[in-house]
Image (cartoon, grey):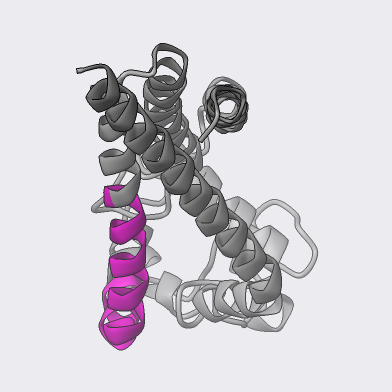
Amino acid sequence: MSYNSVKSLKWLHFAFISLFSLGGCGILGVGVWLSVTQGNFATLSSSLPSLSAANLLIAVGTIIMVIGCLGCVGAVKESRPLLLSFFILLLLIFFLEILSIMLFFVYQDQIDHYAQRDLKRGLQLFGTEGNVGLTNAWMIVQTDFRCCGVTNHTDWFEVYNASRVPDSCCLEYSDNCGLVNPGTWWTAPCYERVKDWIQQNLVALWIFALCTALTQILGLVFSMTMFCQAVKVETFYA
C-alpha cells in the first residue's frame, strides 16, 4: 500500500469515527435535554426505576463518545493499542447486540409475562408520594395510546380497591371522570396497544438496526485495516 493510500485511509477512518463520536454527542445531548426538561417523566417499571428514556440516551451517548474518542486518537496517532482497543470494544458491543436480539426472540413469551407482571406492580405506586414520574408516565401512555391498564382496565380496580380508573383512562378527560360509568373509559390494554405500535413501526426499527450494524461493521473494518497497516510499518522499520 502506497504512502498516499495509507494517509487517505487514515483520514477516512478519522472522518468516519468523528461522525460516529458526533452521533454519540448528539444522543447524549438529547438525553440531557430530556432529563432537564422532562425530569418528572420516568419509567413505567417498578423494579427498574432508573430505566427512563433520558437515562438510556445518556448512557448510550457516553459509551459511543468514549469509544469514538479512542478510535479518533488511535487514527491520528496511528496507535496500535488504541486502534485495537477500539476494535475490541466495538466488536464486544456488536456481539452483545446480536446476543440480546437472539435471547429476546428465544425468551419472548417469558419476557412478555415478566414485563406485564412488573408493570402491574408499578400500578400500585401510581399517585403515591415520590412516584411523580411513574404517575405522569402512565397518564401520558394512557392518554396517547387511548388505553387503560396493563392487560385490562380492571387492573386499576385492585389499585383503588374500587371500580374506578385514573382520569387519563377517560374517553373525554375531566376531573373525577374515572368514577363515572365504565362506558366512558378506554378499555383497550396498554401493553397490547404499545406492542401494536411497535409492530406498525417495525420496518423503521429494522432500518435503524441495519444502519447501526453497518456503521459498526465499517468501524471494525477501518480500525483493523489501520491496525494491520501500523503493524506492517513497524515491522518494516524494525
The residue at the far right in this view is: 172
Segment colored magenta: 92-116
At which x and y percent is residue 1?
51, 36
Q: Nearer the viewer, residue 212 or 175?
A: 212
Give the vertical position of 55 relative to 80 (above or below): below
Give the vertical position of 228 relative to 220 (above or below): above
Q: Is residue 168 magenta?
A: no
Asked whether residue 188 is in view, the answer is yes
70 vs 21, left or right, is left
Q: Tell me which residue sits at (37%, 60%) in the image.
A: 123
Q: Tell me which residue sits at (26%, 74%) in the image.
A: 114
Q: Nearer the viewer, residue 89 or 58?
A: 89
The C terminus - image quarter:
top left
Q: Is residue 113 magenta?
A: yes
At which x and y percent is residue 65?
45, 25
Q: Tell me which residue sits at (45%, 21%) in the image.
A: 75
Q: Nearer the viewer, residue 20 or 192?
A: 20
93 vs 36, left or right, is left
Q: Tell me which residue sits at (34%, 33%) in the image.
A: 227
